DNA sequence: CAAACGCGAGCGAACAGTCGCTCGCGTTTA
DNA sequence: TAAACGCGAGCGACTGTTCGCTCGCGTTTG
């Protein structure tokens, strides 16, 4: 018997279980193509029960997106910033690549972006999240510039935007090119950026 | 002249008209959310007639994607490569930004990527297209390196991939952040890359 | 010249199916 | 017992697609 008792699992626990099941379905089919029936089957629940925990399919999608964002925010918060800019970026890249290799999560990311282009609520959430993430990266860049570790010609905001954009683009590309060697490319990206930032002339002050 | 008794419009012309109407609807609603009814209304045709020109909704989507790709291929073919790498890139960026400002096309691009993550046919087409585009860019980079115009430390493939990725990422970002100053950022990207490539010493041979 | 005809573009109601979602009811828990 | 939980048949709306049909033009025929 499946002791599906009330107190066997708490409300949030059941929510998370549904979310996890839904995530799998969304990854496989995309947000729109995935049907509630599939999600219910994946969660091993009836529609009525699922709708007890999420008021609508959209609510489910939004919850999923929010969870993903929380994950990323936590990740960037845990960055080893004390080791300098490049190492921190490497760690961030490593984290992103792990997602890539966990196949499917990147599909979800693209799907999320597509959703954002239609759903203003999702768009706002994503925008806000990016602003926070990019802001932190920019301040790291600025700190490195002030300390003289890297050149100062580049606007920190532009650079941080470039970095995010490059990795997002890489993820996008990996979506339809599964054999792409993302790891090598990411490393190449970082090498290029590092060189551009003047890590080749680490101690010289008169850079220009 | 023509054998078949077409009316005042030829078959391809009608196809294109439908495609154009469909494009508008897709931009507004996305591929999945757009209904055939909407498309028919936009094209000012009945379903029966539309299905005379396109065998299915998917066929319509694929045709649209293909047209968009052809546009890009033509664009990169018309690049002013003789003026050097950076100017060519600037021209490419300008072209991309015009798309951005033509509001909507970027949504379609994200939608296309999302579609590719599920539809292998679309994915293959996109992959192929990117390989061609990136290949040409890489050969431009290589030529510039050989001529000594830019530094030779960076793998041309990595650099061209980085450039495409950065701009794709920028487009993606613009999707959910309409107020983003894409023009300024694109310029910043190119400045950064140009500086990294050592274009500030344009004529000197002993670059590194 | 007029009349008859064939062709095929265009039509739109109807189809079979799927969608997200609801609601009444039996079961379990506190 | 009251309350929370879980169920799943069923709802109305809408989907992409089909098919029997109309009708006007271009050609052939008388």
Image (spheres, coloured by chain):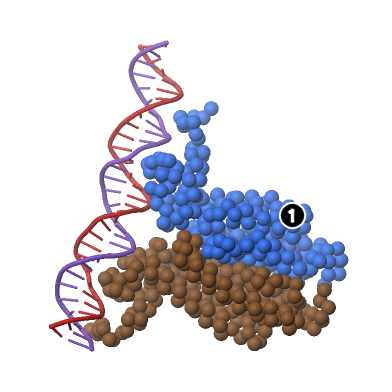
Chain colours: A brown, B blue, C purple, D red
Instruction: State left or right for residue A171 relative to residue B190.
Output: left
Q: Residues within 10 Å of mark 1 (few under 14, many from 20)?
A: some
**Residue B62: horizontal and vertical position, in percent?**
49, 52
Figure quadrant of the C terminus of chain B: bottom right
**Residue B18: horizontal and vertical position, in percent?**
47, 43
Residue shown at the point (76%, 61%) measured from the top left: B143
**Residue A6: horizontal and vertical position, in percent?**
26, 83
Residue B172 appears in view: no
Residue shown at the point (41%, 44%) measured from the top left: B41
**Residue A2: horizontal and vertical position, in percent?**
25, 83
SS category of the residue bearing label 1: helix
The chain to which mark 1 is attached is B
Residue shown at the point (78%, 55%) measured from the top left: B83
C22, A163: nearer the viewer: C22
B20, A58: nearer the viewer: A58
C1 shown above or below B188 = above
Instruction: State left or right for residue B120 relative to residue B188.
Output: left
**Residue denoted by label 1:** B81
Residue shown at the point (53%, 54%) measured from the top left: B104
Q: Quadrant of residue B125?
A: bottom right
């Amino acid at each position: 018997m499946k002791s599906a008792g009330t107190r066997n699992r708490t409300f949030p626990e059941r929510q998370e279980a549904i979310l996890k099941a839904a995530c799998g379905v969304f990854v496989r089919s995309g947000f729109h193509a995935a049907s509630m029936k599939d999600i219910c089957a994946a969660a091993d629940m009836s529609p009525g029960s699922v709708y007890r925990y999420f008021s609508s399919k959209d609510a489910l999608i939004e919850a999923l997106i929010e969870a993903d964002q929380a994950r990323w925010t936590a990740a960037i918060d845990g960055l080893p910033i004390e080791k300098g800019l490049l190492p921190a970026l490497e760690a961030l890249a490593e984290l992103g690549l792990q997602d890539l290799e966990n196949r499917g999560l990147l599909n979800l990311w693209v799907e999320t972006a597509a959703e954002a282009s239609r759903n203003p609520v999702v768009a706002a959430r994503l925008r806000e999240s990016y602003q926070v993430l990019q802001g932190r990266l920019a301040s790291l860049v600025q700190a490195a510039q002030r300390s003289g570790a890297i050149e100062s010609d580049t606007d920190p905001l532009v650079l941080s935007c470039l970095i995010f954009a490059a990795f997002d683009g890489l993820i996008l590309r990996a979506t339809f090119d599964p054999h792409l060697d993302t790891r090598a490319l990411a490393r190449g990206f970082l090498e290029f950026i590092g060189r551009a930032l003047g890590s080749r002339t680490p101690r010289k002050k008169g850079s220009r």
